[in-house]
Image: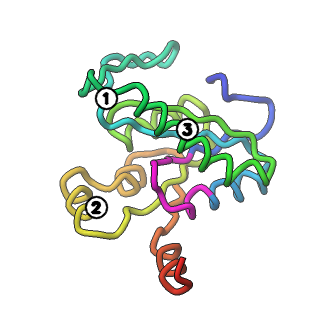
C-alpha cells in the first residue's frame, strides 16, 4: 500500500484536469465526505510517458516536451490545487494531488491499485468536436476503465453541469 493508506476507509481516486467541470470534483468531495474517506486527486500529464513502473518504488517518467517551462507546470498545479481546495476544504475532506504520466486510464488504474482505492471517479468527456475527435482517436477514459478495472468506477456526467450553466447564465 502507498503512503495514502491509512487505518481508516480506503481512499477514493478522482481524475482531475485544468478547466474541468467543477461537477466532477464536487461529486467526488461530497462522496468522500459522506464516506469519511481521503481523496486522491490525480492529474495525468499526457505530455509525459512512463519509462519504468515499479509499484514498490516510484514511476519514472520522461517528458515528450523536455523544454516545457517549469513555471507553466507550477501554474497548472496551482490551478488544480485551488480547484480541489474549493471543492474539498469546506467539507473537511483530506485530499492529496498526484501528477502521473502516460495514458490517463491506465495511470488512474495503476494509482487505484497501488492505493487500495475503493473507487475511481472520472467525468464524461467535455462536449464539442475537439473532445469527440480526441475520444474517438484515444478512446474514452471512462469506457476503458469500466472494461479493464477491478475497482468500481463512478462516471460523473458533465452535461448536467453545462446544462445548468446555460440555463442560469453562469
Dot 1 or dot 2: first in sequence order is 1
Q: Secondary structure at mark 1?
A: strand
Q: Residue at x 39, y 16 (%)?
A: 60
Q: Which residue does the image show at 25% across and 64% down from the upper left?
A: 132
Please, what secondary structure does the residue beneath circle 3 have?
A: helix
Residue at the disc numbered 1: 48
Residue at mark 1 to residue at mark 3: CA–CA distance = 19 Å
Question: How far apart are the two marked residues, 1 and 2, measured between alpha carbons?
Answer: 20 Å
Indicate the quadrant where residue 40 lies. top right
**By what rule are the colours in the image chosen?**
rainbow
Estimate the spatial distance between the alpha carbons at disc 3 and disc 2, rounded to whole Å.
Answer: 24 Å
Q: Quadrant of the N terminus?
A: top right
Give the side of residue 55 with respect to residue 53, left or right.
Answer: right
Most foreground residue, 146 or 23:
23
The image quadrant where one finds the C terminus is: bottom right
- Where on the picture, by quarter, is residue 28? bottom right
Q: Which residue sits at x=23%, y=56%?
A: 134
> Which residue is label 2 attached to?
131
Badge 2 element: helix
Q: Which mark is residue 78?
A: 3
Q: Nearer the viewer, mark 1 or mark 3?
A: 3
| Circle 2 crowding by C-alpha within 10 Å: few under 14, some 14–19, many from 20 | few
Check the image and report above or below for 93 versus 136. above
**Is 20 left, or right, of 118 in this rendering?**
left
The magenta stretch spans which residues? Answer: 14-25
Mark 3 surroundings: few (<14), some (14-19) or many (≥20) residues within 10 A: few
| In the depicted structure, whether residue 155 falls above or below residue 3 | below
Q: x%, y% of residue 86?
A: 68, 52
Q: At x 52% / y 86%, what residue is drawn?
A: 167
When the figure is inspected, residue 14 is found, relative to residue 7, above or below; the finding is: below
Query: Dividing the picture into quarters, in which one does residue 129 lie?
Result: bottom left
Amino acid at each position: 500500500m502507498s503512503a495514502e493508506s491509512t487505518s481508516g476507509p480506503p481512499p477514493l481516486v478522482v481524475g482531475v484536469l485544468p478547466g474541468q467541470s467543477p461537477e466532477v470534483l464536487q461529486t467526488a468531495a461530497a462522496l468522500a465526505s459522506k464516506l469519511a474517506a481521503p481523496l486522491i486527486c490525480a492529474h495525468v500529464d499526457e505530455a509525459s510517458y512512463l519509462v519504468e513502473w515499479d509499484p514498490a518504488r516510484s514511476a519514472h517518467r520522461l517528458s515528450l516536451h523536455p523544454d516545457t517551462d517549469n513555471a507553466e507546470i507550477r501554474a497548472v498545479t496551482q490551478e488544480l490545487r485551488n480547484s480541489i481546495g474549493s471543492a474539498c476544504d469546506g467539507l473537511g475532506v483530506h485530499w492529496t494531488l498526484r501528477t502521473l504520466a502516460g495514458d490517463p486510464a491506465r495511470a488512474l488504474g495503476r494509482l487505484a491499485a497501488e492505493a487500495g482505492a475503493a473507487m475511481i471517479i472520472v467525468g464524461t468527456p467535455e462536449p464539442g468536436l475537439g473532445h469527440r475527435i480526441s475520444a474517438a482517436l484515444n478512446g474514452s477514459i471512462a469506457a476503458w476503465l469500466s472494461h479493464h478495472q477491478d475497482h468500481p468506477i463512478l462516471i460523473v456526467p458533465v452535461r448536467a453541469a453545462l446544462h445548468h450553466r446555460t440555463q442560469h447564465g453562469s
